[in-house]
Image: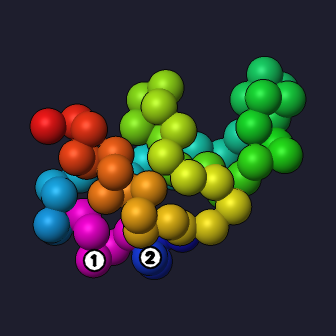
């Protein structure tokens, strides 16, 4: 998913922060079944694989 996001970063001017949930029991319990997960704060955009349409929808809603 990280590689798929690279072309979109310059287009929409965002940074990606990768969080390793293995070091936080609370995060592991909450997200382990849905990784990789792309989120903007508390808003989940897509999980398991990069979904271009969901990313575009997210940025349309953010405007």
Query: Which residue is at 76% across, 48% downward?
Result: 34
Q: Nearer the viewer, residue 34 or 20?
A: 34
Crowd class of label 1 (few under 14; some 14 to 19; many from 20; radius 10 Å): few
Q: Position of residue 3 (x, y in %)?
A: 45, 77
Residue 53 appears in the figure = yes
Residue 24 appears in the figure = no
Chief SS of the magenta region = helix
Residue on which the image places disc 2 = 4
Query: Which residue is at 24% across, 64% downward?
Result: 9
Query: Which residue is at 41% across, 64% downward?
Result: 53
The number of discs equals: 2
Label 1: state its secondary structure: helix
Residue on which the image places disc 1 = 7
**In screen coordinates, is 56 left or right of 31?**
left
Position of the C terminus by quadrant: top left
Q: CA separation, marks 1 and 2?
A: 7 Å
**Disc 1 + disc 2, Cβ < 8 Å:** yes
Q: Which residues are magenta?
A: 5-9
Q: Nearer the viewer, residue 45 or 6?
A: 45
Q: Position of residue 1 (x, y in %)?
A: 54, 69
Query: Which residue is at 69% across, 61% downward?
Result: 48
Crowd class of label 2 (few under 14; some 14 to 19; many from 20; radius 10 Å): few
Quarter residue 7 falls in: bottom left
Q: Position of residue 28 (x, y in %)?
A: 81, 35
């Amino acid at each position: 998913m990280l590689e798929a996001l690279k072309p979109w970063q310059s287009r929409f001017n965002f940074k990606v922060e990768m969080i390793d949930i293995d070091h936080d029991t609370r995060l592991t319990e909450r997200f382990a079944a849905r990784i990789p997960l792309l989120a903007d704060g508390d808003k989940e955009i897509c999980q398991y694989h990069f979904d271009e349409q969901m990313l575009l929808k997210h940025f349309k809603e953010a405007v």
